[in-house]
Image: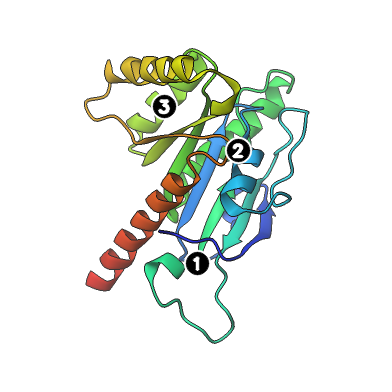
Amino acid sequence: MMTIKTAEYHVSSARVDQCPSSNLPEYAFIGRSNVGKSSLINMLTGNGKLAKTSATPGKTILINHFLINKPAEGKRPSSAADRPWYLVDLPGYGYAKRGKKAQEEFERMISSYILEREQMSVLFLLIDARHEPQKIDLEFIEWLGENGIPFAIVFTKADKISKGRLGGNVQHYMSELSKQWEELPPYFVTSSETRMGREEILQYIGDVNAMLQQNTAGE
């Protein structure tokens, strides 16, 4: 399984052309404001202070790159599991208190990263497991499909509701998607409090990294 040995903040960018010049794979995380993105990132990396959490929604206003498994100087990774990669924290969408102009600028920033950033291997879309399917999320998923973006769904805050309601909400969501999707995207159920879903997400990232390394070796 993928093991995160080190995780450190690398850079924040206001535009996609300011993002790191690198061939490392990137795994980006996005969701509506206050979906628990920073808490999830901290849980995945095992660093409670890596991504800043806030009681105020909409605090992430830049594209934040965190370097995972930075190799020691002069050393090359021995396997795909040790390969360095970037975890990318994208601004949340749908924050009503932003002005129209500011919201449009955020949407441009987000869409340009998602559509233009060749290094992005998977986009993880965070959904609050406590709620019924929301129109804004379904429309975003539809947009991802129309543009052929590889993505996975991450249901957050699983510890905040009962197991029965959790299972029902997840099933409802996937049933809603099945009306338009022949093949459903992979999904994960998580809790930043209990670390639920951590191993599954890291395993998925490790598998994609191994596949990318294989493809590169075969070229």
Amino acid type of the residue tagged 1 in the rendering:
Pro
Q: Nearer the viewer, residue 176 or 39?
A: 39
Q: Nearer the viewer, residue 117 or 33?
A: 33
Residue displayed at 42% across by 65% down: 81
- The answer for how far apart the CA atoms under marks 1 and 2 are is 23 Å
Q: Which residue is mark 1?
A: 84
Q: Which residue is mark 2?
A: 192
217 to 35, vertically: above or below: below
- The answer for how far apart the CA atoms under marks 2 and 3 are is 23 Å
Q: Which residue is mark 3?
A: 141
- The answer for how far apart the CA atoms under marks 3 and 1 are is 28 Å
Q: Secondary structure at mark 2?
A: loop
User: Image quadrant of residue 80?
Assistant: bottom left
Q: Which x, y percent locates residue 28?
A: 51, 46
Badge nearest the viewer, 2 or 3:
2
- 203 on left or right of 3: left
User: Image quadrant of residue 25?
Assistant: bottom left
- Mark toward the start of the polypeptide (2 vs 3): 3
Quarter of the picture holding the N terminus: bottom left
Residue displayed at 38% across by 72% down: 79
Q: Secondary structure at mark 1?
A: loop
Quarter of the picture holding the C terminus: bottom left
Asked which colour scheme the image uses, the reply is rainbow
Q: Which x, y percent locates residue 75?
A: 51, 84
